[in-house]
Image (tube, coloured by chain):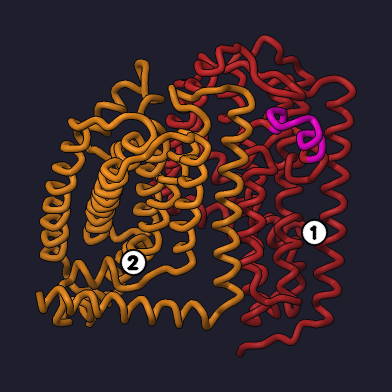
Amino acid sequence: MNLPLSKYWRIFRVSLIERMVYRGDFLLGTLFRFLPMVTTILLWHAIYAGSGKTELGSTAQYNLDQMVSYLLLVHISRMFSSMPGLAGGIARSIRDGSLKKYLLQPIDMLGYLLTYRLAHKTAYIVTAALPYGILFFLCSGYFHLGHLDAVTVLAYIVSLLLAFVLGFYFESCIGCLGFWILEVTSLLYVVNTLNFFVSGHMFPLDLLSPFWATLLKSLPFSYLAYFPAAVFLGQVRGEALIWGLAVEVAWCVTFFILSRTLYRIGLHRYSAFGG
Amino acid sequence: MLALMRYVRLILALARYGLARELAFRGNFLAKIFVEVLWLFILLIFYRTIFTQTSVVADWSESEYLFFVGCYFALEGLIETLFLSNCSEFSELVRSGDLDFFLIRPIDEQFLITCRAIDWSTAPNVLMGLGVMVTALVQLDQPIGIVQVALFLLLFVSGLLLAYSFLVMLTSTAVWFVRNQSLLEMWWLFTSLMRYPKEIFTGPLGGPIYWFFTFLVPVMLVINVPARTMVKVFEPWFAVYIVMATAIMLWVSRRVFRFALNSYRSASS
């Protein structure tokens, strides 16, 4: 393992160990986060009861079980695609001058951060497996897995992995804007708030009118939450599934190129403040 | 009376100082306000989308529900403006030992710790919530009496103080746990119980939650009672109950806070 990859393997290991130190706090925090899910499930029960219908939606129909499953599955999507602290961290490195440590060492900043994030996500997913396992077991009555075949499961896994890549490079782009605007926190607030809605975290985008549903589904944000969950539920199949995955790959490539370009151009502007 | 006036003057001075501090970073201040506007906008789109699929949610029509959302937004805005940021900083004061500097000042500790800074960026939420409530009332087009408005205001203030007492108790736990994150997460849990009509809490899962968070830890009443009084029915039993619960919880939270301070061991040298 004396290849260039070995240094990234070491970063992965150290980051994984660091993350596992606070597993108690993490478990407690995850449990707290689940409790609002209960109120959301009860709200949707009331919505379906009030409507008197068994299915709701415009571009696709969801029954109550599918709706609750969807709302649980977007948590899995976001587990892969959310990158807390990434953009803010990059902007801080630019602002306080600590970015120069990447320039002085034979290491690429985005490569380092990707490996670091990969380790954190691995630790997060391993630790979250228990509370999420309990939650999904308690809600197993809502899940109907009859439609699941090998292709759907494979497509779901691929869509989640791509959601991780897309989430990483999207946030990296925002972080790299720090070369020009220094403080990206405010921008990040706005983007995260918007993302909560347009990614389909609140409810399936299929509930919106056909125009808005089609528009939002074509944006990169939908691949961070909506798309993987819809794939798992069998709402995206056949040609639409292949097309959806292809578009997700295209968004990943776009943000990869954009982040690398912004980083390269940004470095020319960089002044390395700080001691 | 003199002491009360002293506190009023202090609040005004702190409010002026807070506003001056926020306006020193105008861009950031405007961005924070923009996020709050965006959040309300998203919330309204969410409920508009829901009501395109159904005409009622747990016996609440769209306009009635809109009023509920406005009431929640205004009350949550008041809590965030007046208390939340102060309370969330408490664990850091305990951890660093800076709490010592608050305890030696000749003023009530609970006032100083929970009310010292006003977060002006969330203050417009109160006005936005009010705007949503007025819009809902216009849509409802029902006659509104002075007594009804007075009762609503009384119950709204009662709900605010009840929520404040829960926040104080959660804040007090920082003396023992010294952890910043848990307070905001617990508060998030509490608000998730406040922000929906109590009628959704039915069935084998919702029923016990309703009873627990209405009669043992009455957080579910905070928005439900004032909002129901204004747009649905006035329930005297619940009104008396929330006022009494507020008085008791304010007293309990005060005792818990003082007990927590007695357990505080300074961390500084």
Which element is circle 1 on? loop
Residue A28 lies in quadrant: top left
Task: Say whether residue B6 is left or right of residue B204.
Answer: left
* Amino acid of disc 2: Asn
Q: Three-letter amino acid code at disc 1? A: Leu
- Looking at the colours in the rendered structure, which chain would you say is drawn in orange? B
Q: Which chain is red?
A: A
Q: Residue at x 39, y 36 (%)?
A: B143
Residue at image coords 38%, 46%: A24
| Relative height, residue A236 to residue B146 (above, below) | above
**Residue occupied by mark 2:** B86
**Taking A227 as reference, is A8 above or below it?**
below
Pick the front one: A221 or A168: A221
Q: Is residue B114 left or right of residue A188?
A: left
Label 1 Cα crowd, 10 Å radius (few <14 / some 14-19 / many 20+): few
Number of other residues with Cα within 10 Å of mark 2, as a class: few under 14, some 14 to 19, many 20 or more: some
Q: Nearer the viewer, mark 1 or mark 2?
A: 2
Q: Is residue A207 left or right of residue B111?
A: right
Residue A163 appears in the picture as rendered? yes
Q: Which residues are magenta?
A: A205-215
Q: Residue lying furthest top in this view?
A: A146
The residue singled out by tag 1 in the image is A3
Q: Position of residue A2 (x, y in %)?
A: 76, 59
**Residue drawn at 58 percent across, 70 percent down:** B30
